[in-house]
């Protein structure tokens, strides 16, 4: 379970102070699939980065499976991230000189996973995203949708419990976007908890739970199954 209680994040630059998140409250249960929408600059990426422990926060409490993230040192945070979190970034973040196999392998090597286990996972994940025959291709030889699927395979190879995705369909046409969404739905059925930021309201509606970030806070509603709108206190 991922739980944020009154989390605040302030970016301080020379000229301005930006409250990217203010008193942000959210509980994500095991096995959920949540779509996050909201205007540009509202704090969605900031929220994902904090959830993934890529960024510190200023105030409040963040518990990941009961562990108080604010109390961990850098190494403990990195360990927890490696164990539990997978990221799909907006720009794919693939390494251009490496082929697909190697791209997926990099984080596994980094985590000290043995060669035969790396091979097993990479082949399984490439199969899962439908790119088994492309293992030797470099990213540039792939379409945008295929590159996005490599990014998903790379996240999956870590066998994360929580998958955090920042506009995973952002650069794709609607057909490819739906395919990526179907893949994420499959991964969710297989047990991963997913939090997906998207600007695509049609895809968001397919997720069992929708939340909206406005001005650094959760908007005052939560949608379940698209069927009923439940008014709740902010952020529950
Ligand atoms: N490193 C930074 N330094 C200063 N301000 C930042 C930094 N990162 C984000 N911000 C500011 O924090 C606010 C929230 O940004 P964030 O990236 O979380 O928005 P977003 O909801 O993801 O927007 P988009 O939909 O455009 O991706 C914005 O006002 C942004 O300018
Ligand atoms: Mg963003």
Image (cartoon, rainbow, N blue to C red):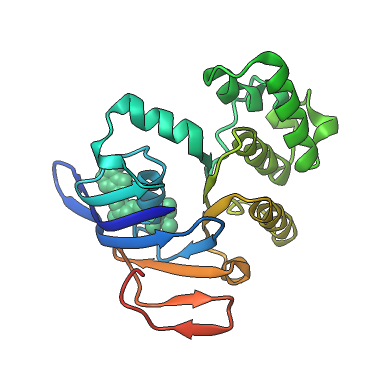
Q: Residue at x 42, y 28 (%)?
A: 79
- 149 with respect to 78 (left or right): right
- 51 with respect to 18 (left or right): right
Quarter of the figure with residue 137: top right
Q: Residue at x 60, y 31 (%)?
A: 94
- 72 with respect to 49 (left or right): left
Q: Residue furthest right?
A: 133
Quarter of the figure with residue 178: bottom right
Question: How many numbered marks appear?
Answer: 0
| Residue 99 appears in the rendering | no
Quarter of the figure with residue 80: top left
- 12 with respect to 29 (left or right): left
Residue 201, position as x, y percentages in the image:
56, 70
Q: Residue at x 68, y 22 (%)?
A: 118
| Residue 155 appears in the rendering | yes
Residue 158, position as x, y percentages in the image:
59, 33
Tell which of 189 and 99 is nearer to you: 189
Q: Residue at x 44, y 68 (%)?
A: 211
Residue 58, position as x, y percentages in the image:
19, 46
208 above or below 153?
Answer: below
28 above or below 153?
Answer: below
């Amino acid at each position: 379970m991922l739980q944020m209680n009154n989390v605040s994040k302030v970016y301080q630059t020379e000229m301005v102070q930006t409250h990217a998140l203010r008193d942000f409250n959210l509980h994500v249960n095991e096995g959920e699939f949540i779509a996050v929408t909201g205007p540009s600059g509202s704090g969605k990426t900031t929220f994902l980065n904090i959830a993934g422990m890529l960024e510190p926060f200023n105030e409040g409490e963040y518990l990941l499976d009961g562990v108080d993230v604010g109390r961990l040192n850098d190494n403990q945070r990195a360990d927890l991230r490696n164990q539990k979190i997978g990221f799909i970034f907006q720009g794919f973040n693939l390494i251009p000189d490496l082929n697909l196999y190697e791209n997926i392998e990099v984080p596994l090597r980094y985590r000290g996973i043995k060669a035969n286990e790396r091979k097993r996972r990479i082949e399984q994940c490439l199969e899962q995203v439908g790119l088994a025959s492309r293992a030797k291709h470099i990213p540039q030889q792939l379409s945008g949708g295929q590159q996005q699927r490599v990014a998903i395979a790379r996240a999956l190879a870590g066998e994360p419990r929580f998958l955090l995705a920042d506009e995973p369909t952002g650069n794709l046409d609607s057909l490819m976007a739906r395919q990526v969404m179907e893949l994420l739905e499959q991964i969710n059925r297989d047990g991963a908890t997913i939090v997906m930021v998207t600007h695509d309201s049609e895809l968001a509606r397919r997720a069992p739970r929708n939340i909206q970030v406005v001005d650094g806070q959760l908007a005052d509603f939560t949608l379940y199954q698209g069927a009923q709108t439940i008014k709740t206190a902010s952020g529950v």
